Image (cartoon, helix red, strand yellow):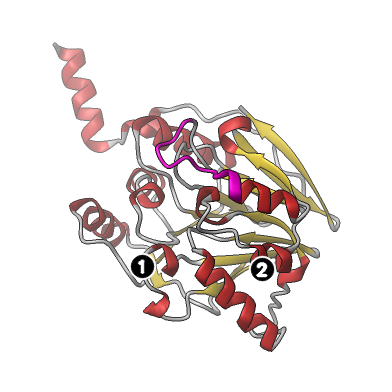
Amino acid sequence: MLLVAVIALVHVFVPLSLLLPAYQVEARAEGELRVHFLDVGQGDCTLVEFPSGEVVVLDAGDGSFEHRNHLVRYLKALAPSKLIMLLTHADADHYGGFRALIGAFGADEVYLPALGEDTPEYAALLKAVENSGAEVDTISRYDVLSDGSGAYLACISPKSLEEGDGNDTSAVMYLDYEGVGVLLAGDISSSVERRLVREYSLMEGIFDCGEFEVRLEETDIVKVSHHGSGYSNSEEWLSLLSPECAVLSCGKGNAFSHPSAEALDRIASAGAEIYRTDELGDIIVTIGEGKYSLSFRT
């Protein structure tokens, strides 16, 4: 009985996730940047680990017991010097794990989408963000996150709420470090992809954020739109990006049949090698000295 009481008391003051052991993740070498595409089933979670040790968490999965614990243990292993959280859009499979992260680590900065969701779960997330004391901002075009190393994350969409439904208001982020480009496309549909292609065709520097250039045709790695949906990943978009690698975040046997055969065909036709979290587990991209490599953690 005493043991039960002690455990209950500890749980009041210390989130149980803090008691979870860190994973064994190979240390990042000096000057390297890493992008970790975590296997969170049918959801999204990408960690950008800057050379300074700062970490940006873009989306946090669905918040299920298995996936939130996976994320907490992974972040413990990275031991970020600064923690920034960015929600691309207000779908539960993208924001579900953020409350657990805030409870375990707090947050230095939080970027939220302009369009939220009218649910108790999303309201609870907003309350947790407010209680964390983090700096809070809304993510939109021309926002930039950087750490002084030369690496930067630039937002190219949305520019307004006129994009349509929640998926189309997803934050689309372009990452550049030492000439290697990574495009993180959120859940945008082909209509937004085509609009971005049209805008870019008008002026190459239209998405530049001051000194931070966005050159979409220099994309080496794309995290494909909407888990590989057939209603995203258009030919025009993939032709502009012409990526060497395409990363898909999706769950085994998911109810949406993601990725679709049509999207896979279009991605392959664009010349990209396909890497899937449902097949490979966590996918890690390491960038340094103008080159990149991929590794996997199951």
> In which image quadrant can residue 207 be found?
bottom right
Extreme front residue here?
262
Q: Which residue is mark 1?
A: 165
Q: Which quadrant, please, contains the N terminus?
A: top left
Our reading of the magenta stretch's main secondary structure is loop
Q: Which residue is mark 2?
A: 236
Residue drawn 58% across the image and 42% down it: 78
Q: Which quadrant, please, contains the C terminus?
A: top right
- Asked if residue 207 can be seen in this view, the reply is no
Q: Secondary structure at mark 2?
A: helix
- The mark nearer the N terminus, 1 or 2, is 1
Q: In the rendering, at what x and y percent does residue 18 appear?
A: 39, 34
Residue range in magenta is 253-262
The residue closer to the viewer here, 208 or 100, is 208
- Asked if residue 217 can be seen in this view, the reply is yes
Mark 1: few, some, or many residues within 10 Å (few <14, many ≥20)? few
C-alpha span from label 1 to label 2: 21 Å
Q: Amino acid at mark 2?
A: Glu
Residue drawn 75% across the image and 56% down it: 270
**Closer mark to the observer between disc 1 and disc 2:** 2
Q: Secondary structure at mark 1?
A: loop
Residue drawn 22% across the image and 58% down it: 123
Mark 2: few, some, or many residues within 10 Å (few <14, many ≥20)? some
Q: In the rendering, at what x and y percent does residue 155 appear?
A: 56, 72
Q: Amino acid at mark 1?
A: Asp
Task: Please say if 19 is above or below 196.
Answer: above
Mark number for residue 235?
none
Extreme top residue here?
1
